[in-house]
Structure formats: structure tokens, C-alpha cells
């Protein structure tokens, strides 16, 4: 699994909250999000779920090679059927989103990128079950899926806390949305970010947001 801009954006964008003591990372892949959160929140404990054996092994290797290995527990499991006695303050994911698209021939890529294995409805159900009464849910999705996600969250009686429109360039249409949901009633905050100022040059806002996680910034 490659390190993608989506996960970097999500991990960098999410603000540190003291209440985030127990975190659940769903579909951890390489372990990137779990490691980013451990870097930002050294007192938090993260459980990182992964369904694919190869990705799980890679995440374990990356976590064990880091100085945050005591903060992260990587679990090989199908998140839809996973059970835990813990309730989490934050659930975070860069979920599958190629709904009804042509399936990849590679089984790992298929599992990682398609809603055939883990749908938006599955994600909201997981948050409902494993999040405590004050928990939040953070994710990044394409615009179409983000609107569907907001609708499902509203139907559950929960709330959209933050919505960030993500663009490649300032004049482009938004392609992704950074989303933060809450089980508690809250006022929605809307904003936007574009990744590039020009071809091959990152925008100042993107650099400022992600500089703690890039070695060359």
C-alpha cells in the first residue's frame, strides 16, 4: 500500500483534543494514520484494525520500527465483525470509496479501496457501536460519498462538526472532503484547502498543515 495524500491530509488536519485518549484507526494499511496521531498525541492509545494480511504485516513492521510502538496496537481483523469492550473517543479512517467501480485484480487493493468490503453504512454502524457517547468520527471521502455520509450520520441523530473542501488547485472543483462528525450537537464549520499553488509546487496552506510529517518541507 502506498502512502497517499488523503491520509496525510486527514492525519495532519485533525486537531489535537485532550479527550482523544482512546483512538480507533479503521483500515490502517501501512499504519500511517496511527503513527501520525501518535506523533501528535503522545498520551493517546490507538487500536489499528486491518483486514489484509500483507498490509497488517507492513503496519506491524512500521509501528515496531517507530518510537510510538507502545502506543499502537495493530489488529488483523474484519472491522465489521470486530468486538471490543473498549469505547473510543475518536474513530478515524481513510475508508474505501470506489463504490460500484471495476474491481482490481489485486485482492489487497480490492479490499482496501472498494465498498464491497466496508461501506459507509458499515463505518457509521461501527462508530455507533464502538464510539462512546461523546466520541467523534474523522474521515476523508470524495464529494459524492461525503454527502451520502452526512445524510447517514444525520439519520442516526448525530452531527457534522467540520467540513473541509479539498481541491487540487484554487480554481478547481473540490474532489475530496475532510469530515469530522460528533455525537453531540455542534455548530458546523466549513472551510477549504487546495494542495497545489502551481504545477509541482505545494500551496503555503498545505505546507503549513503537513510540514511536521514531511522530511523535505
Image (tube, helix red, strand yellow):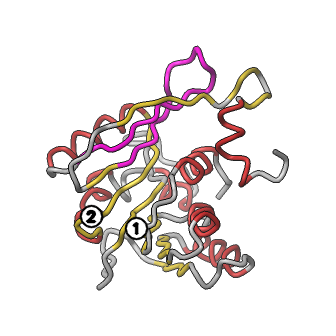
- Using the image as rendered, state which of residue 107 and residue 59 is in the foreground: 59
At x 56%, y 78%, the residue is 72
Q: Quote the CA–CA distance across marks 2 and 1.
A: 9 Å
Residue extent of the magenta highlight? 159-180
Q: Neighbour class for label 1 at 10 Å: few (<14), some, many (≥20)? A: few
In terms of sequence position, does the residue under pointer 2 or pointer 1 come before the other? 1
- Using the image as rendered, state which of residue 72 and residue 74 is in the foreground: 72
Mark 2 in CB contact with mark 1 (< 8 angstroms)? yes
* Residue hosting label 2: 134
| 160 drawn magenta | yes
- Using the image as rendered, state which of residue 81 and residue 198 is in the foreground: 198
Q: Which mark is residue 204?
A: none
* Residue hosting label 1: 19
Q: How many marks?
A: 2
- In the rendering, at what x and y percent does residue 84 appear? 32, 82
- In the rendering, at what x and y percent does residue 137 appear? 36, 56
| Image-based side of 96 in relation to 185, left or right | right
Amino acid at each position: 500500500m502506498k502512502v497517499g495524500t488523503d491520509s496525510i491530509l486527514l492525519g495532519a488536519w485533525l486537531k489535537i483534543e485532550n479527550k482523544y485518549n482512546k483512538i480507533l484507526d479503521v483500515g490502517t494499511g501501512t499504519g500511517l494514520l496511527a503513527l501520525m496521531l501518535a506523533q501528535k498525541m503522545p498520551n493517546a492509545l490507538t487500536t489499528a484494525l486491518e483486514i489484509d494480511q500483507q498490509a497488517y504485516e507492513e503496519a506491524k513492521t512500521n509501528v515496531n520500527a517507530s518510537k510510538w510502538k507502545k502506543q499502537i496496537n495493530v489488529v488483523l481483523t474484519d472491522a465489521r465483525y470486530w468486538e471490543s469492550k473498549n469505547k473510543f473517543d475518536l474513530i478515524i479512517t481513510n475508508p474505501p470509496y470506489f463504490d460500484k467501480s471495476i474491481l482490481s485484480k489485486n485482492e489487497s487493493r480490492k479490499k482496501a479501496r472498494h465498498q464491497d468490503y466496508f461501506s459507509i453504512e458499515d463505518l457509521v454502524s461501527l462508530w455507533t457501536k464502538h464510539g462512546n457517547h461523546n466520541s467523534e468520527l474523522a474521515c476523508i471521502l470524495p464529494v459524492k460519498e461525503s454527502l451520502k455520509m452526512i445524510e447517514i450520520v444525520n439519520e442516526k441523530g448525530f452531527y457534522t462538526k467540520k467540513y473541509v473542501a479539498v481541491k487540487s488547485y484554487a480554481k478547481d472543483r473540490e474532489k475530496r472532503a475532510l469530515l469530522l462528525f460528533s455525537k453531540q450537537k455542534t455548530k458546523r464549520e466549513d472551510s477549504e484547502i487546495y494542495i497545489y499553488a502551481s504545477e509541482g509546487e505545494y500551496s503555503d496552506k498545505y505546507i503549513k498543515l503537513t510540514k511536521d510529517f514531511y522530511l523535505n518541507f
